[in-house]
Structures are given as structure tokens and as C-alpha cells.
Amino acid sequence: MSVEPLVPDTDRPFDCFYVYPTVSRDLTGNSDMVAGQEELRVAHVQAARFRQHCRVFAPLYRQMTLTALRSSRAGEPFTGDRALAYADVERAWQNYLANDNDGRGVVLVGHSQGSGMIRRLLNEMTDPAERSLIVSAMPIGSTISRSDNDPAEGDFPWMPICTSAEESGCLVAYSSFRDTVPPPANSRYGRAGRAGEHVVCVNPAALLGDGGIANSIFSTSSTWSSSQEIEAWVAGKPIPTTQFVSVPGLISTRCVSRGDFTYLEVSVNADAGDPRTDDIAGDVVRDGSRVDSWGLHLVDMAVAMGDLVALTERQYLAWKAARD
């Protein structure tokens, strides 16, 4: 094993605007405006690596909390206020445009609840000048739907779906599931909520021409209390002292459609003959049992983190070339 430091580019000519997922443990329906360790930790795990190529803006917002989510799952009234959460994100976006953007290209990145905020931001974005600033959008781990027949229908249809790394102003979205545990009938992700629509899935590794071998980068400490822990990355070796682990060749990804579901299928290329781990953590575990309806939601970004970061640079170069 060797250490590979992340060295940010000397010149980072574009920005990344990141909205984090549901992590707040505040006991109210919406979080306060004080960043707890959970907000700081998830921003580090999901957003910090993007600073290799871009300036990262990660606004705090009064998101709907884990408390509200768990109460709803228990059959109690949902106490979260989605409008309040979105209003914070929308104000942060407008503040960024007014005070920090200065005509720079920007990648919109989000996960789970954060992706829902990005989705609404793009659905409500009507100004051509504002749209022209978008290098790409990466609302990961959420349901982004498009019409089966009408290209003008669905979520922000003005933005095309990315088909190569040399495109800009396009969309990268997916929700991930193990190849051995496809979405069950009650899955939370991968199925469009409206008739006549389908869910968008874009495989970042395929855009980069990596033959479906993902550049996965995992955190060495758990971000999620609902996830199992990795026992050992390499047999007989201690947990690495670095904060992230890269696993070259271990993970393959591809977009698949089965029945009503479209999703990123994640395969672990286990090799019993070497000492490296033959599995990854990331499933939601409740009362000791895996909850299949969540898939690999907790590591949606980790399974393709290296690819997502690399894509931002390639897409920015395409965005800049189109404007020169």
C-alpha cells in the first residue's frame, strides 16, 4: 500500500456548488444553522475531493433532519419543512452568483436530499445567462426523471444527458445497487414517480472510457451510523491512517434497466487469491439486517468518486472551449 496525496491544482478556474444529504441529528424537523460534526463530516467525505480542480462552495441549510425521516418511517406525522430547506439553498445559490461567481463555470453537485435541492434549483432555472454558467449537474442518489416520449417533459429537460466526458452543460445522475441485490419492489430509488417517465442513469466510468471499471474512493471511517463497518481493507494489515482509500480495479459499474427500475449496478471484482478485501461497506443496516430498498445509497458517490472528480475537469475544458 502507498500514500497518494491529493494536490489541488494551482489554478482552479471553475467552481463546485455542493448540497449535502440528510445527515442532521438535530431533534427538530428541520436542522438549525449550526454545523454539527455530521454536516462537517459528510461535506469532507463527499465534497472535499472536488477541490482538486474546483473551488468548493458548500452552504449550510436548514435541511429536513434524520429525526423527521425516522419519525415518518415509524408512521408518525412528517415534521420536516422541505420549502424551508430549499429556500436556504436557493438563497445561498443567489448569494454565490452575486458575490462569488464572476462569470465562472460551476458544477452543481448534490446527494440524496441535497440532490433534491439541486433538482428543484434546475427545474426553476429559466434565465439563459444563468443556465450558461452550468458546466454540469451531478444530482447523485436521487430520482431524476425524463419523459419516455416528449423531450420537453420531465426534470429540467433543457439540460441534455451526458454521453461523453467532452460535453458540458449536461447531466450525470444515478442511484446505485449491488449486482447481487437489485432494487426490490419497494425500492426508494431507481423508479420514476410518474407514468410515462423513466429514471436517468449515467455511468461516470463509462463517460471516461474506463470500460466500466470505476475509480472508487472510500472513506476509512464511517460517515453513516446506519452502515456496517469494513473489517479490513487488506488482510493482516491495520486500517489505513489516511482518510480515504482507493481500490483500483475492485469495482465495476454499469447502468441497467430491469422492469420499472433503472440504476447503476455495482459489481465487486473479488479475488480470493489476494489479501485485499472482497467486499465493500455501504448497505443500510437496521437492527442487524440489511435494508435492500436503500441499495448502496450510503456510498453512491464513493463508488465513482474518482470518476466524478475527473469528469469535472474534462467538462470544464469543454465548457471553456465552447465559450472561447
Image: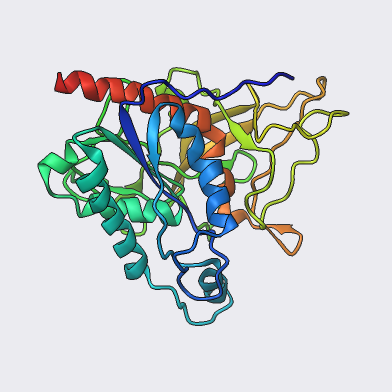
State the image quarter where residue 204 is shown. top left
Q: Is residue 215 left or right of residue 139?
A: right
Q: Quadrant of residue 44?
A: top right
* Number of numbered markers: 0
In the rendered image, residue 281, in percent from the top left (x then y), is placed at: 69, 43
Residue at left offset 48%, top offset 54%: 21
Q: Is residue 85 above or below residue 167?
A: below
> x and y percent of residue 3 in the render?
67, 21
Front position in the image: 262 or 40: 40
The answer to whether residue 154 is visible is no
**Location of residue 283 with respect to 50 vertically, above or below:** below
Write the residue at 44% across / 24% down.
310
| Residue 265 percent coordinates (x, y) | 54, 37
* Spot occupied by residue 191 in the image (x, y as percentages of width and height): 42, 53
- Asked whether residue 56 appears in the rendered view, the answer is yes
**Residue drawn at point x = 50 percent, y = 38 percent:** 48
Q: Residue furthest toward the left?
A: 128
Observer-nearest of 321 and 249: 321
